[in-house]
Image (spheres, rainbow, N blue to C red):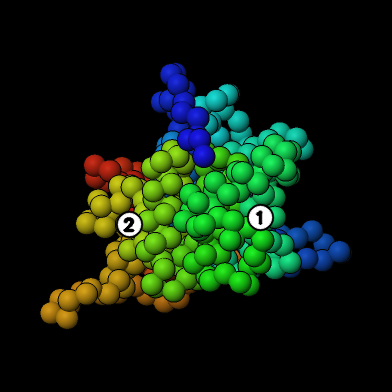
Amino acid sequence: MAAAAQPTSPNEDRPLLQVEGLRKHFPAGSSRFRRNERFIHAVDDVNFTLGRGESLGLVGESGCGKTTTGKMLVRLIDPSDGHVIFDDGTGEPTDIATLRGRPLKEFRKHAQMIFQDPYESMNPRRTIFDTIAEPLQVQDIGTLVDRLDRVMEMLALVGLTPPRTFLFRYPHELSGGQRQRVAIARALIVEPSFVVADEPTSMLDVSVRTGVMQLMADLADGLGIGYLYITHDLAVARYMCSRIAVMYLGKIVEIGDTEEILRSPQHPYTQALLSAVPVPDPTVAREPVKIKGGVTTLINPPAQCRFYPRCPIADDYCETNDHPPLEHKGQEQEVACYKA
């Protein structure tokens, strides 16, 4: 499979993806007699950039908005507000948040998604060949013979060999690790420059996780693909990503170089996440971060810091001011905290 087209000057200095003020608000209940005024703020004013060939880890607890963010970036769901500027270096930058019709279909050649559950993301009545070749068929790429050759090439690339023995098997005949490799092959068959990977190893046995993670890392290096890697596991994020963005209740609260954040987390929530990671040494006792209370509701949340009700260092200033913006707090970190 040919490597993804490499950008040339002057486009090479621009990020692959630039996310500005991204929001997704879902109605919370409805009535035919009155206007709905209650909304779930699933993603609220998210901003970050992703470089070409870079892997950015989006980490946080369940329900914080990670998957919703990923789906908006590949336009599986429409954002409520904000911009997603996509620039793969082969044309003019495009705000994909506004795309409709044929331009949106064209964009899907450049951005794909790998879903969390390999058991649910495939049609059990379609063969492996049909599953992987479907994006080519939808985009009207190549003849049937061309598609067969491309599918066999992709099967070999993701380690399913010999390819011919997998072409006409069905998903139920494959193991979990093999199915996830098929899902990776399906995502890469159109040679995208951007892939959202939504916890692609969380449903796999521990014994096969490392192999799939190494495969994705190798493909990113070899094909120049930019990854948004969604995970709740900081160890996986460290292995896969050069940068980490920590998300809490729809907001990014800290973003920066992976090793810098893991070595010196600045936001109290990031510190709490790290304190929950077990240390493989029985002689080491990690002091837990004492956060308070429970998770705040996402229905019409107050303007104050989202972490304020649980924060161990919050004061009156945090209570009476809006959620803090991301600001540089260190060499390679941006933190949304007044007290960090």
Percent coordinates x, y for residue 320 in the rendering: 43, 57
Percent coordinates x, y for residue 210 in the rendering: 37, 63
Percent coordinates x, y for residue 252 in the rendering: 44, 53
Q: Amino acid at mark 2?
A: Tyr
* Mark number, residue 162: none
Does 167 appear above or below 221? below
Q: Secondary structure at mark 1?
A: helix
Q: Give the residue displayed 59% in from the left and 38% down from the top.
A: 110
Viewer-proximal residue, 263 or 7? 7
Comparing labels 2 and 1, the label whose residue is closer to the camera: 1
Q: Give the residue displayed 47% in from the left and 71% down from the top.
A: 204
Viewer-proximal residue, 71 or 290? 71
* Mark number, residue 239: 2
Q: Amino acid at mark 1?
A: Phe
Q: Quadrant of the C terminus?
A: bottom left
Viewer-proximal residue, 317 or 110? 110
The reply to whether residue 293 is in sight is yes
The reply to whether residue 81 is in sight is no
The residue beneath circle 1 is: 129
